[in-house]
Amino acid sequence: MPDQPWSPDVVLVDTSAWIEFFRGTEHPAAALIDRLLLEDRVAITGVIRAELLQGARNDAQKAALGRQLAATVRLPDPADLWDRVAYLGYTLRRKGFEVRLPDLAIAVVATAHEVPLLSLNGHFEAVAGVSTLQRVKL
């Protein structure tokens, strides 16, 4: 893995976990995100940022979200992202799993940078079964 400007123990936080955090629930994922933020160990991808910002209810919320997300590590897409996404989707489909394109991209970025993924979406378990995706267990 190439040298990177972020801590080796960052965690990629998926949209599903962020939703619990922003709702202020007592879900274990929300508490973990709070701790990771304090430790500067939260990472996102462009896809996750886009998913969160598009869900904002108004301009003020979108701006606040943008400021909060700016304090996280943004993992860059690998140069061959879409080829990897296609291969991963193809592999999963052959095993009977349909995974949305954004989630395939998130999994590829996580595996490319060898960082664990915090997600509440169960289909990432199938992804981990056919790739080197590491998942955070709650």
Image (spheres, helix red, strand yellow):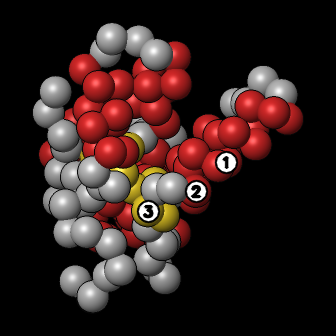
Q: Distance between the residues labelled 3 and 2?
A: 8 Å
**Residue 54 picture location, percent across and down:** 73, 38
**Residue 37 picture location, percent across and down:** 36, 45
Q: Which secondary structure, mark 3?
A: strand
- Name of the residue lying farthest toward the top: 26
Identified at 34% across, 34% down, the residue is: 34
Residue 131, image quadrant: bottom left
Instruction: Characterize the local packing of mark 3: few (<14), some (14-19) or many (20 or more) Cα atoms within 10 angstroms.
Output: some
- Is 88 or 57 nearer to us in this picture? 57
Q: Give the mark nearest the N terminus, 3 or 1.
A: 1
Q: Are marks 3 and 2 in contact (CB under 8 Å)?
A: no
Identified at 20% across, 69% down, the residue is: 8
Question: Which residue is identified by label 3?
Answer: 73
Instruction: Say left or right for 135 vs 99.
Output: left
Q: Distance between the residues labelled 3 and 1?
A: 13 Å
Q: Can residue 78 be seen in this view?
A: yes
**Figure label count:** 3
Q: Are marks 2 and 1 in contact (CB under 8 Å)?
A: yes
Instruction: Characterize the local packing of mark 1: few (<14), some (14-19) or many (20 or more) Cα atoms within 10 angstroms.
Output: some
Residue 51, image quadrant: top right
- Name the quadrant of the N terminus: bottom left
Identified at 33% across, 36% down, the residue is: 33
Q: Which secondary structure, mark 2?
A: helix
Question: Which residue is identified by label 2?
Answer: 70
Please name the amino acid that badge 1 sits on.
Answer: Gly
Q: Which secondary structure, mark 1?
A: helix
Question: Which residue is identified by label 1?
Answer: 66
Q: How far apart are marks 2 and 1 (CA)?
A: 6 Å
Please name the amino acid that badge 3 sits on.
Answer: Val
Q: Can residue 47 be seen in this view?
A: no
